[in-house]
């Protein structure tokens, strides 16, 4: 992977990371279980995507261990 692609992955991981607290807020503030379930799925998808992007950026290994940068 090129350095440019790794930098793009790192930037997108940062963007997705900002969504995680918002999804948690949606979970806690939801007034129905359907909205809370949707927010939980959104959070799970965001975390999964961020982890993949972090791997692409070389920040963590495939096993989830952070690399020493």
Image (cartoon, rainbow, N blue to C red):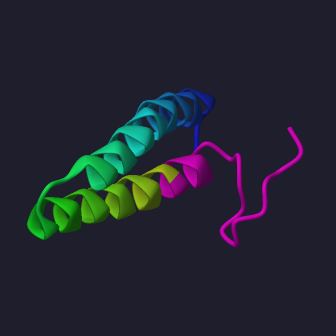
Magenta stretch secondary structure, dominant: loop
- Residue drawn at (15%, 69%) of the image: 33
Q: Is residue 63 above or below residue 40?
A: below
Magenta range is: 51-69
With 45 as the anchor, is 10 left or right in this view?
right
Drawn side of residue 11 relative to residue 59, left or right: left
Q: Residue furthest front?
A: 31
Rendered-image quadrant of the C terminus: top right
The residue shown at (37%, 63%) is 44
| Number of numbered callouts drawn | 0
32 sits left or right of 9 in the view: left
Q: Residue 65, relative to residue 1: is it above or below?
A: below
Q: Position of residue 2 (x, y in %)?
A: 59, 36
* The magenta stretch spans residue 5: no
Quadrant of res 15: top left
Q: Relative to 59, is 14 above or below?
A: above
User: Which quadrant is home to the N terminus?
Assistant: top right
In the rendered image, residue 65, in percent from the top left (x then y), is placed at 78, 63
Q: Which of the two residues, 46 or 62, is positioned nearer the viewer here? A: 46
Q: Position of residue 22 (x, y in %)?
A: 35, 38
Q: Residue at x 68, y 47 (%)?
A: 58
Q: Nearer the viewer, residue 66 or 44?
A: 44
In the image, residue 68 lies in the stretch drawn in magenta: yes
């Amino acid at each position: 992977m090129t350095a440019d692609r790794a930098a793009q992955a790192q930037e997108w991981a940062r963007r997705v990371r900002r969504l995680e607290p918002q999804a948690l807020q949606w979970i806690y503030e939801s007034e129905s279980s359907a909205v809370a379930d949707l927010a939980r799925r959104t959070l799970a998808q965001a975390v999964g995507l961020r982890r993949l992007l972090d791997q692409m950026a070389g920040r963590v290994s495939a096993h989830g261990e952070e690399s020493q940068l």
